Amino acid sequence: MARQDYGNDLTNAILQPGWKLSDDGFGLHTITATYKTDNSTGFNFLRGDPFTVSAYSYCKLHKQTSSFDALGVQTVVCEYVGIPTDVNGGAYTNAQMTVAGGLTTEKIETNYYFNSDIAGPPPYTQSPLGPLVSIKDPASIFSQAVTGGAVAVTKQQSFIGLHGACFENEDGGKFLGFVDPSEPYFYGKTSYLAPQQTFSGIIYVTDDETVNMFINLLSVSSPNGNWDDNLPYIIPTYLTGSGDGGTFTNGDYNQLLLTQSNVESYGDLYKITYEIKYSFVGWHTDVYLRIQDRA
C-alpha cells in the first residue's frame, strides 16, 4: 500500500514534545531534543546551530543522531550545550574541582625542615658514630696537576648533627645518613613520606582567547586561584577561604602551579580540563614564572 501524506509534510524538522534540559550544577546546560523530518530533506542539522526554542537559543548543537524510520520519516536526536547569561554573563561556567591528596617518597635531605628541626644547622661536630671520610690534601692536588704525581689522602671522622645526622665535613657537604642507634625514629632512614596535593578542574568557556590564555599560563605559579584578571577564578573559594590573594604563598614564593591544560571543542563551547599542583615550600621564581613576572 502506497504512503498517503496528510497534514505537515515534514519538509522542515518539527521539534517533538518532551525535550529535556539538564544543569550540571556549575552552569553548563545540556538539552536533548528529538525532531521529526522527511527522509528526503537529508541532514539539515549543523554543529553550532542554536536550539530552536528562542528562550534557550544560547545552547548550540554539539552532536546529533538520525534514524530512518518507516514511511520515509527521519527521527533526529540532538544534543545542545550552552551557558545561560545568569552564570558569569554566559562567558564561562564555575570551576568544577576535585582535590587529590597523598604521600610520596622523597629523600629525607629534601625535607623543608632538614637543616633546622631534623639535622640542625651547621657547624656540625666530629663523632666516632659515623664512617671515616677521605680528605685530599690541597697541595698534592696542585702537585698532581703540574707533575702528575699521586694525591695524598687522609682519613678523618665524619661530623654529626641532630638525631645522628651524619655529614662529610663541618659545614655539611654530602649527607651520609642517620648513624646514631639511640635515635630509632631516624637511624638508617634515607627517605620520608612527603605530602602531595593536586587540584584537578573542569571549566567551559565561550571564546578561544580564554583557551589560549590557559595554554600560555602553563608552568606559571599563582598565590591564589586567579592566574589572570581576564580568566575565571579556577579554584573555588571553599578551598581558598576568602578567595583573596596571598592564601597559597610561602614567603616570596607562590604555592600553586598550573601544570596541565587540555582543551576540546564542545558544541560552540570549549571544554578545558586543567591540573594545579600544590607545593608546601613554593615554586621558586628562578625556575617557574609567577603571574606578576610574566610581562
Image (spheres, rainbow, N blue to C red):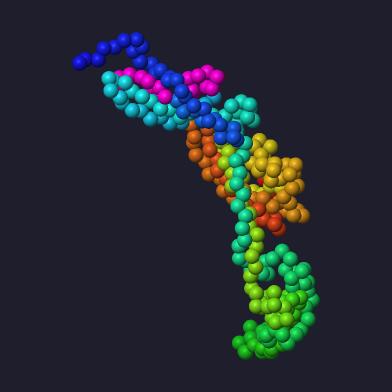
Q: What residue range appears in magenta?
A: 34-57
Q: Residue furthest top?
A: 7
Q: Is residue 180 above or below residue 203?
A: below
Q: Position of residue 168 (x, y in %)?
A: 70, 80
The residue lying toward the viewer, choosing from 62 and 78, is: 78
At a point 46% along the width and 28% down the height, the residue shown is 32
Q: Is 194 displayed left or right of 16 in the figure?
A: right
Asked if the stretch drawn in magenta spans residue 196, the answer is no
Q: Residue furthest left?
A: 1
Q: Is residue 254 above or below residue 118?
A: above
Residue 160 appears in the figure:
yes
At a point 52% along the width and 27% down the height, the residue shown is 21
Q: Position of residue 266 (x, y in %)?
A: 49, 34
The residue lying toward the viewer, choosing from 191 and 253, is: 191
The image quadrant that residue 108 belongs to is bottom right
The residue lying toward the viewer, choosing from 87 and 91, is: 87
For the C terminus, the image quarter is top right
Q: Position of residue 77 (x, y in %)?
A: 40, 27
Q: Position of residue 280 (x, y in %)?
A: 70, 57
